[in-house]
Image: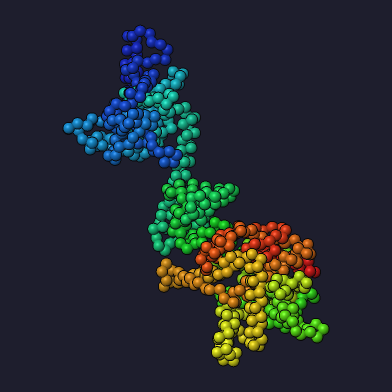
Amino acid sequence: MTDKTTNLLALILAIVTAASIEYCSCFTPPRNSVPPSVRIRTPLFASTEEDVQGEGRLVEFTSGSGAHKQVTLGAIIGKEGKKNLKILTSSGRTSSVPPRSIKHLVPNGRVSRQSQSTSIESQVGQIAQHESAAAAALEEDSAAGGQSVAEVWEMLLDDNDDNNEPSTIDLTTLSELLLGDATSISCYATRAVLTEGVESFCFKEITKGGKLWDDNAGPMYEPRQADVVETLRSRAKVQAQEVAKWEELKQRINDVVSSESREFDIEQETEEIQAALRSLTRLACLANLPEEATREEKGTGNDAEAAESAKLFLHNIGHRATPEVARKLLISLRILGWHKHSNLDLIRLNVRTGFDQDLEDAATDIASNPPPDLDEHSRLDLTHLPAFAIDDASTKEIDDALSVEILPAMDGVTEGPIHSRQRIWIHIADPSRYIELGSPLDQEAKRRASSIYLPTETIPMFPMSLAAGPLSLLPGEVSCALSVGIMLDETGGIDTATPPIITPSLVNTARLTYDQVDLLLDPFCMVDNGIDSGICDSISDDIENMETAVENLRQLQYASEQRLRWRMDGGSLESIGPYELPDMMVKARPSPDAIDGWEVSVVAKKVHAANRIVTEFMLAANEAMAMYGDTQGVPMPFRCQEMDDVSQDDIEATPEGPCRSWLAIQSTFRSEIVSNPLPHAGLGVDMCTCRRHRQFVVMPTLPCTIR
């Protein structure tokens, strides 16, 4: 037994002896009562709110709630309003505290009242003395491994065994045993050790219905049973290991964050930490969203669970659990592909920007070893017709082209309107030629639904070895397509007397940009310079006869104008606001010399003839496919839209140009995808298919039906 233990036992023996003498000299007390001179006694409580409100009294009070709840030491210096107390803290600030928030009265704890000789600084100093003593006691307790508290607990536990009933001990007595005196400073330090020290689980503070203990002796404590303490010790050990684990991780994170070149090695972490770091993605992608949108995006299921896991992770490493903090941390750690320009929308919507290696391998195999063509014998050879693939110069996926076919005269009649002998062909790249239904590539394309065009990149439906290869209508090569042949009536609508032709086909395209087509269709340019003037030298070498090409483009231009007038007669948006808003071209590419590392260009391009040609005949193809699906009973997605009626007065009251175009747009409802054909008011057509679903629903379905 150590000298310290011997002294503690001697002190307890002296207290018990004194109590016995006093007890024997008095009347027989009630059962379980112990004389007040011994601090192992029946507790006394602050009976009323008035007892709490003594000016100068040192108290602990709570503020905040949840994770932000904290306990603070302060001195009552007066009242605030009718009920609240005005409490001064060691920071020199005062708080308005309701009496119910007072959780502890420091035994004998009072600061000097304010007077001419006592300033607020003096009171603040006295409060700070108590806090400093508590911090020093905790530090000493930690260094000793909680030995003093454990020894007192063992002695009291032995006393319990001798008396066959639990004994209690007040704070002032424990303070005398542990620190040698019962001053308010020692009592406050003792309570800190009992509640926050290494062996804080040895004693249980007794509570009585939320009342406060009398401030002369402080709260009562009861030694816990040995098996309970052992369980709590084991639990504390596990918790300490957990805290140490997070502290070590926090240090590794801080080391990387403070470095400008190091990258956090996520592979060296445990699976638990790796999963936690990956969960940050689901929280970080919500950054910069309005609060309401953030609540909606959190949703339910795996994403919501991941976001909550991310918040817990941030809390464990001492960070605020917000989307912006998660985003900045991922960027600082340089992990999971995050950088300051990461597209949060793509991440939030779980858009896959790349392809798994097995899909890349499958695409490469198809490109080098094409499967048998199921439509080989039914493909219509249209390679004799010039086919113009009109798109931006930067486009890599060439998925449509246009041709004009002049039909032979019937019964020797060569006169009459041109539309009666002119068939316009819209050629669409045929993915069903190479992609087997139900294959992994087919399933991935259906999951993606569409290629995504961004200022920074294009995210294709298929690996680029296919998308920009066999699945494109490559210029100068014979390509497989699904061709839609339509004839227009005198109003510009699809001639129902000559139903559209939809057939697998072979085409040979020539590549043209919008600017090149507009140049060829510019009458002043062609008149001034002529076909042979060299103005066409920059145009594709795949065009064998430039004069024929220009003639075909003019025929397409005229037909597209007919189509636009026909749609306007059907009540399309253009019937309200014929002005076409500029086509905004936004491009961004990495550049070490640019501000923020990116070079951004924004160009507003006016819509000219080339754009109208492509737009009108893509719409016509969608309408023709819908007509075919409706008459042949082929299941396919139809796109429809409703519009509010816009009065002529409203139209005339709105300035022409962009304002009137916006008036038209505001009159529309959200478009819908349905299984039965319905009008699309915004386009002014009775029915049409959905362009977005065309490649993976309509395109595979039509060849199967045709077969």
Image quadrant holding the N terminus, namely top left
Quarter where residue 673 is shown: bottom right
Give whichever of 214, 631 is nearer the camera: 631
Residue 125 visible in this rendered orientation of the protein: yes
Q: Determine the residue positioned at 20% across, 33% down.
A: 118
As displayed, is residue 705 above or below residue 297?
Answer: below
Residue at point 48%, 37% (across, down): 234
Is 302 situated left or right of 442 in this image?
left
Quarter of the image for the C terminus: give it.
Answer: bottom right
Q: Which residue lies furthest to the left in this view?
A: 117
Identify the residue at horizontal 58%, vertical 48% (top origin). Answer: 300
Q: Residue placed farthest to the right in the image?
A: 411
Q: How many labels does the image show?
A: 0
Residue 194's x, y, as percent?
A: 38, 32
Residue 320: percent from left, percent from top = 43, 49
Residue 241, percent from left and from top: 46, 44
Q: Does residue 439 appear in the picture of this structure? A: no
Q: Nearest the camera: 665 or 337?
A: 665
Please say if 483 is above or below 206.
below
Which residue is pictured at 42% across the width and 15% down the height? 32
Residue 257 lies, in percent from the top left, at: 41, 57
Position of 35 with respect to 536 (left or right) is left
- For residue 116, above or below residue 647: above
In the image shown, does 683 or 692 lie closer to the viewer?
Answer: 683
